[in-house]
Amino acid sequence: MYAICDCDSCYVSCERVFRPDLIGKPVVVLSNNDGCVVARSHEAKALGIRGGMPYYQLAENFPGVNIAVFSSNYELYGDITRRVMDIIRDASPQFYRYSIDEAFCILDGMDHLDLKKWGEDLSLKILKWTGMPVSIGIGATKTLAKCADRYAKDYPGYNKCCLIDTDEKRIKALQAFPIKEVWGIGYRYRARLESININSAYDFTMKPRAWIKKEFKVIGERTWLELQGIDCIPTEDMSTKKSICTSRSFPGTISDFSALRTHVSNDAARCSEKLRHQHSVCSMVTVFIETSRFREDLPQYGNNGTSVLLTPANATQEIVKSALDSLKKIYREGYQYKRAGVIVSGISDASQIQTNFIDFNADRHSKVQRLTEVIDNINRVNGSETIVLGSQQYTAKDGKGKAASFRDAIKHDFRSHNFTTRWQDILEVK
DNA sequence: TCTGGGGTCCTAGGACCC
DNA sequence: TCTGGGGTCCTAGGACCC
């Protein structure tokens, strides 16, 4: 059996840990640059606020409604969910984290237990220890566990845990389950299925396997099997990523090369930090830039460029240099750029670097490594961005000659404090 | 004025190899 | 006139997830 543990309205719930007065009230959390709504409380959903709605439309569509608004604060969400995950890890025989707010547990060797009670107890413990409400769904496959989780979330009667452990319960659950809610059925498949009158998960399972395979390929076939209770989605180790991306939209637009260069340097530096964090190196660095697709009145341009590293690397200087080489090739003057980003791929283990016998210089390599370690240590002790490359430095904005930091290059008018990770901020507030 | 930021997998087609 | 059979790797695009 599998259990999926999923935080309820994760970002909103993180904010509510420090603002319990907002429990029971409509709350939304915005994307970077306060762009659009990415998380909604139950009450906000009930008002009809849609996910993805641009923030400026919120005031237009809900005049006079009191809605609490937060900018996203990923440092806070990362820290709270880490605590939640620690508790789940302790409570289950096998655990793997699926996303910032979800984890799968493999419940091997727990047949003698009352799994429904196990789930209810775990959910209550997490709420008591962290303040985070969590719903738990349990089933014979990951897809069925996901269905159960939907029920646990939507109906208080389940007491935060829904268990599908018989074929009777499975069929009953699938008959009342809209096809669009099934894990693995997205926007496109939903439209195709509904157009031929397949509306419930149960309808889907009643179609012949060969037809499903023909129309929806191996992915659809897998979902079909999973809904019948046949386990076939492998439990992947998601902890080591195969590609890593850092990208940002700008608060306004940028046309000038040097400003774009600063942003891309920071994106590349952040990618190299993420690589080092998972003890990986990469062999390809891709840069992309694009104008705003919403500004049809302006000339549009988007492009990407990839550089290959002769020797795989994770040092900030090397990743940034490759990224800037590509940026020079794809940059065109005369466009208002809205977004840029860096993707590193061709990822392998840092302890097993395949060296290139023409390019590789062992002496230089060890110096670069040592320097990177020193910089990482200083930044860890004194706060991120204490030391950065020159190319990452933003032009002074505050009039005191102090350069604005990467964190501040994003609009975040309603951001809460980093209550659990930056105690200095809290002292300042006091 | 204002519209996010990460990831994964599969498939088809082309280039190239012997 | 007649033109095989078996591979690999890469890329772009499409689909999905949170």
Image: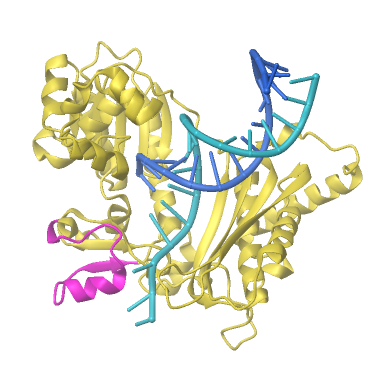
Chain colours: A yellow, B cyan, C blue
Q: Position of residue A236 (x, y in %)?
A: 47, 27
Residue at 38% in and 19% down: A232
Q: Nearer the viewer, residue A322 or C3?
A: C3
A68 magenta-colored? yes
Is residue A82 found left or right of B15 in the rendered image? left
Residue closest to the eye, A263 or A327? A327
Q: Is residue A98 visible?
A: yes
Query: If the image is split into quadrants, where does the C terminus of chain A sit?
Result: bottom left
Q: Quadrant of residue A141?
A: top left
When asked about the image quadrant of residue A346, the answer is: top right
Q: In percent of the image, x 23 and y 34: which residue is there?
A: A149
Q: Is residue A206 above or below residue A408?
A: above
Tell me where residue A214 sits by quadrant.
top left
Q: Is residue A408 above or below residue A423?
A: below
Check residue A296 for magenta coloring: no
State the residue at coordinates (21%, 22%): A207
Q: Count up the numbered dots.
A: 0
Horizontally, residue A73 falls left or right of residue A178, namely right
Residue A408 is situated, as x and y percent measured from the top left of the image, at 51, 72
The residue range painted magenta reads A46-70
Relative placement, left or right, of A331 versus A124 is right
Tell me the quadrant of the picture where the N terminus of chain A can be found: top left
Residue A134 visible? The answer is no
